[in-house]
Amino acid sequence: MSTPLPGFEGLGTTPDDSRNQDEGPRDRRELAPGAVHVPGWLTLAQQRELVAACRGWARGPAPIRHTRLPRGGVMSVQTVCIGWHWQPYAYTRTADDVNGVRVAEFPYWMVELGRRALVDAYQDAAAGDDYTPDTALINFYDDQARLGMHQDKEERSGAPVVSLSIGDSCVFRFGNTETRAKPYTDIELASGDLFVFGGPSRFAYHGVPKVHPGTGDPASGLAGGRLNITMRVTGLS
C-alpha cells in the first residue's frame, strides 16, 4: 500500500472555514437519485497537490493530448489517463493512439480519495467500502473548450463516477439516462467542488457547455483553465 499524497490524510475532516467559499456557503445538493454535488470539498492545499500530480501525469509516459474521434473530429478538451487509457470508445493499458506505451499506474491514494468522496457525497460511512477505482480521465479545459452531452458507458461496472473540479468554474449540464435532450439541469462547478453520480444516475448524459475564464483562484496551483478529474471503475482486469 502506498503512502497517501501529502495533504490528503485528513480529507473530509477539514473545518469549513478553510474551504472554498468566496461567495458564501454553498450547500450539498442532490440533483437526481445517486447524483450529488458537494461544493468546496477540496481545500486549496489539496487542490495544489492534485494539480502538481496532474502536471506530472500530463508529461507522460503517455502525455496529454486532444483526442481524435472515429469520424475525424478532434475534442477541444485535452486528456491524459492513468490506470487505463481511454480512447473512443474503449479502454486499453497502452496509449495506442498516442505513443503506444503503458499509461501511469493508478495510485492507491487516489483510491482512498475516491472512497472518501463517496462517504461525504452520500453521507454514508459505508458508501466507499467496496469502491476501488482503477482509472481516471483528467481533462483540461482552456477558455474555448467544451464537452458535448455524452454517457460514460465504456466501463463494465456500474460503480459511481467521482468528479473533481479545479481552476475556472464551468456550467455543468446533468441530464437524464435516455436522451441528450431535455430534461437536464445546469449547475456551476467551481474550484474544489465534488460531483458524484452513481446508482440510477450512473449512465445519465452530461456535458460542459461553457467555461468561465478568470474565475479560478491561482492559489489552487492553476493560473488559468479548468482541470477535471473523473475516477471510475472499469470492471476490467
Image (cartoon, grey):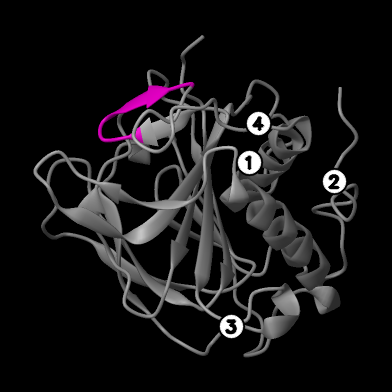
**Nearer the observer, disc 1 or disc 3?**
3
Badge number at residue 106: 4
Badge number at residue 216: 3
User: Which of the 4 image quadrants contains residue 41?
Assistant: bottom right
> Can residue 210 be found in the magenta stretch?
no
Real-space CA distance between mark 4 and mark 2, rounded to the nearest whole angstrom:
13 Å
| Depicted 129 relative to depicted 38: above or below | above
User: At label 3, which amino acid type do we have?
Assistant: Gly
Coordinates of residue 215 in the picture (x, y in percent): 53, 87
Q: Secondary structure at mark 4?
A: loop
Q: Secondary structure at mark 3?
A: loop
Q: Earlier in the sequence, mark 4 or mark 2?
A: 2
**Nearer the observer, disc 2 or disc 1?**
2
Q: Earlier in the sequence, mark 3 or mark 2?
A: 2
CB under 8 Å between discs 4 and 2: no
In the image, is 16 to the left or to the right of 169? right
Residue carrying label 1: 118
